[in-house]
Amino acid sequence: MTPRPATRRLQAVAAAAITAGTLLATAPAAEAARPGAPCTTPQVKAGWYGDNQARLQQLIDQYGRCTPYRTGRSRRTKPVAVFDWDNTVVKNDVGDATLYWLLRNGKVRQPAGGDWSTTSRHLTPAAARALDDACGTLARPGAPLPTGTPEGAACADELAAVYGTGATRTGGAAAFAGWDRRTTEPSYAWLPQLMQGWTTREIRGFAAAARTENLAAPIGAKQQVGTGTATGWVRYYDQQRDLIGALRKAGFDVWISSASPQPVVEVWAQDVGVPADHVIGIRNTTTRGGKFTAHLQGCGSVADGADTMITYIDGKRCWINKEIFGVRGAAAEEVQPAARRQVFAAGDSDTDISFLRDATALRLVVNRNKNELMCRAYDNSDGKWIVNPMFIEPKKQKSGPYPCSTTGYVDHDGAAGPVRRGDTSVIPDQTDTVF
């Protein structure tokens, strides 16, 4: 019997309701607008290499949720995305930019007691002597050094050399020794240690001033630091700004993990919508008065003040596990179950290896020709790696293969060896194909 028109209309309404209910239950998560407004999936804009835009869109379609981003909401209800900062979200290094500003404006203090070895447990006697020779007579202990003046230029030169090259300016002696190559980098750690005596608020002010200068300077600009010159510009990558915005709108819990000082990255991250409480940088211990000391906060089994577990390679894993997923103690140093790991990660350097490998769904690599990172990305043994050239001034193709099978991996003691997969098999040498 053919249903009457009224019956057909009721059946159609019921079918539509069932279909709508199914779509609401299974549709990918996305941005929620006004109450009652339709849920739409944020779209990743163009400007990516190859099929990277499509892969990123697929990530959003699969993991996004129709909820707005709220930092107060339980983190476990949202998929987590973690970005490195320097040369991943921006071109150039905001830590470098801040140090150069500090030197040009005389904001590095003579260490307490006049002993430069107190600024880093890894500083060599040769470096301490070189710094004392160049800076020792310029200011009393605890006072700012006049590194932006002609009389302080040699001091600025020595500080810039130790930080930038890991060696003394005169004689080229090693500036640091005795560190774990998978948990810290003493020159990176030295920048926040040189900020001793200032408060977080003051450091944010310095970082903001450096940010203004570096964004206003033309691409390729140089600045004078001491008697030398240094890079004088920074730019946000439009593609990464857009991606972070799309992920946030889709309901992802977006974090920054950087080996630059905490308050510095906080200032820069605001412009891409990532709040300070979602930034994990190198963190100083402070005095009761809130001033930075020359010691750093610890993670995992490493106590505060030990200065050996910064946001660097395995240290990034530890800090991410601690701050994002609430893992405490030595367990934070270990790979966590998939449910307690980020689904997406983005980085550009070997310093990002561990937290990239921990990502469960997709890993974005900005190609800066870093050996271990590119070995793993090009090997792509689980199909979750994507590679993109730098968005500004991309590197040329590496002339030879990456030495994955021989020296691509640097161990805790600094010894070089082959890069191995999770099953311990050796990754063969890889050719640079995305440039």
Image: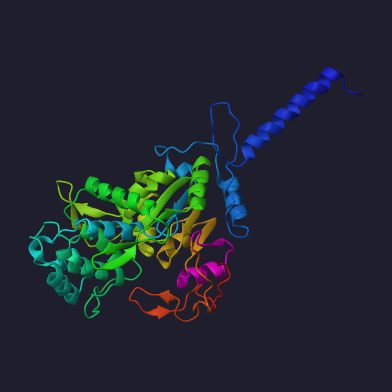
What residue lies at 33% left-to-right and 47% top-to-bottom? 267
Q: Is residue 100 left or right of residue 390?
A: left
What residue lies at 10% left-to-right and 64% top-to-bottom? 138
Name which quarter of the figure residue 38 lies in.
top right
Farthest-out residue, right: 1
Instruction: Give coordinates of residue 84: x percent, y percent.
Output: 42, 57
Instruction: Give coordinates of residue 414: x percent, y percent.
Output: 34, 76
The count of marks equals: 0
Instruction: Give coordinates of residue 270: x percent, y percent.
Output: 38, 44
Q: Quadrant of the C terminus?
A: bottom right
Q: Is residue 360 magenta?
A: no
Q: Colour scheme of this structure image?
A: rainbow
What residue lies at 59% left-to-right and 34% top-to-bottom? 39
Camera sees residue 304? no
Relative to 199, say whether 221 is above or below.
below
Q: Quadrant of the N terminus?
A: top right
Q: Is residue 116 left or right of residue 76?
A: left
What residue lies at 47% left-to-right and 60% top-to-bottom? 356
Relative to 212, say whether 16 is above or below.
above
Name which quarter of the figure residue 152 lies in.
bottom left
Which residue is nearer to you in this view: 106 or 278? 106
Camera sees residue 275? yes
Instruction: Give coordinates of residue 78: x percent, y percent.
Output: 48, 43
Magenta stretch?
A: 369-392
